[in-house]
Amino acid sequence: MRSRLAPWLTLGVPTVFLIALFVLPLLSMLVLSVWRTENYHIVQDWNLRNYWVLATDGAYATFLLRSIAMATAVSVICTAIAWPVAYGITLYGGRYKLLLTLGFAVPFLTGEVLRVIALQGLLGPVGLVNGVLMSLGAAPLRAIMYTNVASAIGLVYLYLPIVVTVIYLSLLNFDQRLLDAAKIFGASPARAFFEIAWPLNLFGTLIGFALCFIPCLSATLAPRFLGGPNGTLYGMAMAQQFGESGTWALGAAMGVVLFVLSIAAVFVAFRTVDLRRTGFTGFGRS
Amino acid sequence: MTTNDSLPLGSAASPAGFDRRKALKTIAAGAAAAVAMPYVRPASAAPTTLRALMWEVYAIPEVIKAFEDKHNVKFSPTFFDGNSEAYNKLRVGGTRDFDLVQADGFWPGLYYREKLIRAIDYAKIPNTAKVFPVFKPDRFKLLTDEATGTHFGVTWCWGSYGTTYNTAMMPKDKVQSIECLFDPAFSGRLATSARFEENIALAGILVATRMGTKDKPRPDGKPFNPYVLTDEELAGVEKLLIEQKKLLLTRYNDNNTLQQLLESGAIAAAPEFAQSYRVLLAKKAKGEIDADFAHQLIPKEGGLGWVDTWLVTSGVADGPTLTLCEQFMDMMLSPDIMKQQALIGGASTTIDIRSIATPEEQKLYLMDRTEELSDMYMFDQPSSTEKWERVWSRMQAA
């Protein structure tokens, strides 16, 4: 009895959960996107006008391109930082490996808003960085005050712990003896890394990259508090539709476009990578 | 498998005749009664809770406790950030969930037209008689139904969207015009709020002034209202805001950020509700800062103003709850409470409290300048939120 119920319970409960909290809200967003709003009222007038506005008004395409550029830059930076950090922990962490990895999760003990506001204080005109510079008689760094650079710093700060943790978990399952074998057969450390460690942990790296890239695409808080007048990203513009402007239907259409693009990006990434050669073990042994 | 498992559902009768079906029915009936209880409570019963949808800045614990103790009820506030958020809450059944609601500008009128709030009787709220003349119903029309003359709200605190500036960085003659917020001479030393309506409306006043359309007959036959702009004016606003963007250090999201920007000298001026200005003056008085700050209430082209109000939702029927709402509003409008509100919340009051205020407080809280409100354009609903949203998005993307 237990063996027949177990799959239903273990798969059924998450399925119900996903349908109730993910599929249904997504469907309601899809429906809302083909209605329209008029001065804070939703008008159930089926049309594709919101998508037409998104396609023809350059502003929304600009927000999207800015977001893609920002998400790519932040994900590349996070991955570039996370790899040596996670690799270092794996190789030299000894018995403190877990502790060191958990250390990266400490910022998650506070809310995202608090972390962004703390960063605003750090980078702002009277923040720590500029405060020290000014007390030393130097000019404040305007590049980190309400600019896209500040937004990028904020996003790296927010998502780096996730990327480090994912790459660390991938490296934890990686057999380090393969590197030793490569070196014994004459490979330089760099060649051993690029021909063995990197490809066999590519799947974990891609997961880390995706877990940084996708939330960065819809980031709202960092650009709002750190980004300045030129820092409006797609997520921030989308949140605006559901906030004071009350143009919910357009916001829903923006959400649908973002969802489709995110899925497409993940699909393309995984189509172009041979998962069997990236350390992915999810296909089983058969 | 037990014997009971083979019996049909509900057939497991006990010796006392209380079976599973009866038990389920009893539980279901009990649950339904418990859920329905708040809604079937007789209207004549004395309320035990007063529920308000309000701005957090006005929830002063001492004031709320005094009210609760006096009337032996619990005051249950729910906070919102913007009018549109409160409006949405009311429209999705909030009139049953809240007894009182706050709003400013045109929103009370919109709420009344949509039957989200109800009429109130000023005779039951005697402190309404103590408002400054400019807030009396004969002059302040936003809380009176034009057709029937019915009142549907009481005034509370007021303010403008004036310009706070560092007197050493921005000359006084410059700040008397909205042009100062668009002047390349102050490039990188200006900030504005992140609120799209007020940014567009303020720019709209300047654009209409430059175009000479402000004092000419309007398409709707009404006097100029910066929230009702023509397409040509909106195009001008978009161009102006794009030009302004290059001059801004940032668009602040909260008063604390603005205060830091002004205090550090990072910016010379910014339009705001005078709350940061008051904090900076208090710091100056304590010797915590050296810089001098001033506040231009209304620019020469015209400025924006707001009056926060208290309203009673349409879910409140005649009877004890309405009486409690009236008592609450009357207490909140009493001069002592209003003074407390001004000092803690940092807002100017619509009740005349000059007799209990020091000369410094009278100056700081603009008590002798209430008449200037009649020269301001009240916060209003954009004529088309969709068109305004496009203007704002295009400016952000430029």
Image (tube, grey):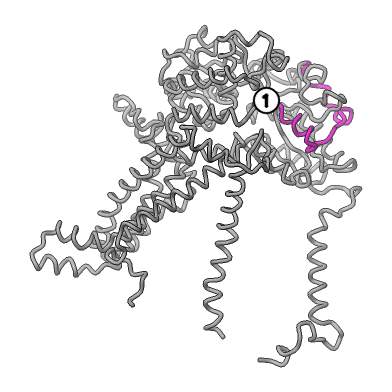
In the image, residue B12 above or below residue A23: below
In the image, residue A194 above or below residue A81: below
Residue appearing at x 34%, y 30% in the figure: A143
Using the rendered view, name the quadrant where residue B23 is placed: bottom right
- Residues shaded magenta: B106-133
Q: Is residue B280 magenta?
A: no
Mark 1 lies on residue = B380
Residue appearing at x 35%, y 54% in the figure: A269
Check the picture and name the quadrant holding the N terminus of chain B.
bottom right
Closest to the observer: B316 or B46? B316
The location of residue B6, given as percent across then percent down, is: 72, 90
Closest to the observer: A11 or A176? A11
Q: Is residue B341 left or right of residue A99?
A: right
Residue type highlighted by circle 1: Asp
Check the picture and name the quadrant holding the C terminus of chain B.
top left
Q: Is residue B177 left or right of residue A218?
A: right
Q: Element type at marker 1? A: loop
Mark 1 crowd level (few <14, some 14–19, many ≥20, 10 Å Cα): many
The location of residue B359, given as percent across then percent down, is: 67, 15
The location of residue B323, given as percent across then percent down, is: 87, 39
